[in-house]
Image: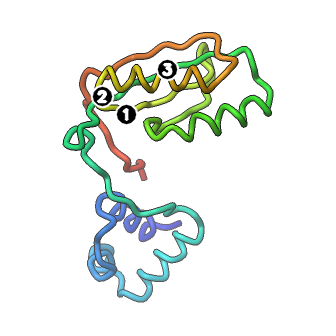
Amino acid sequence: MDIFDRQILALLQQDATLSLKDIAEAVNLSSTPCWKRVKKLEAAGLIRSRVALLDADKLGLGLSVFVQLKTQHHDNQWLAQFATTVTDFEEVVEFYRMSGEWDYMLRVVVADIAAFDRFYKKLIASTSGLSDITSSFAMEQIKYTTALPL
């Protein structure tokens, strides 16, 4: 990956709707070499997808909750079942296996506390083996980006 590839990726992170012509002009390449680079980046999996980022507040989904979970189970079979169950919840927008005190962390996006309570009840009813759960409500989003530092 060279400077042209990094510039192309940076542009696409900011606006995936840019035309190939606009990208090529911005990185000082002609259209064909630029197109080949974009295709190569896609084939290599560096560009996973192109999506629209939505405004959660305007959609009535303004509450982000960070849920930390502990379990007594650390075998692959339990993890596979747990991962399948949790990823099926549309409210879960991020899901991580962690090091340290907590085993897993979720970012859950919902409309309000009542919606989170419904999610929480579904979560505990559909998963077994959790020994502790704590939730932290985001008071203010200070920074949010999907752009990776290139």
Q: Distance between the residues labelled 2 and 3?
A: 17 Å
Query: Is disc 2 surrounded by few (<14), some (14 to 19) or many (20+) residues within 10 Å?
Result: many
Residue 147, disc? none
Q: Could you say whether the residue bearing mark 1 is in a helix, strand or loop?
A: strand
Q: Could you say whether the residue bearing mark 2 is in a helix, strand or loop?
A: strand
The image position of residue 40, as x and y in percent, is: 54, 75
Residue that lies at the very extreme toward the left in this rendered image: 58
Residue 63, disc? 2
Please name whichever residue, 8 or 112, is drawn nearer the observer in this view of the structure.
Answer: 112
For the residue marked with disc 2, what is the amino acid?
A: Leu
Q: Between tags 1 and 3, which lies in front?
A: 3
Q: Could you say whether the residue bearing mark 3 is in a helix, strand or loop?
A: helix
What residue is pinned by disc 3?
Answer: 121
Residue at horizontal 39 percent and vertical 17 percent from the top? 136
Q: In this view, does 4 lie above or below 63?
A: below
What residue is pinned by disc 1?
Answer: 109
Coloring basis for residues:
rainbow
Q: Between tags 2 and 3, which lies in front?
A: 3
For the residue marked with disc 1, what is the amino acid?
A: Val
Asked whether the beta carbons under mark 2 and mark 3 sit within 8 Å of each other, the answer is: no
Q: How far apart are marks 1 and 3 (CA)?
A: 15 Å
Residue at horizontal 46 percent and vertical 41 percent from the top? 90
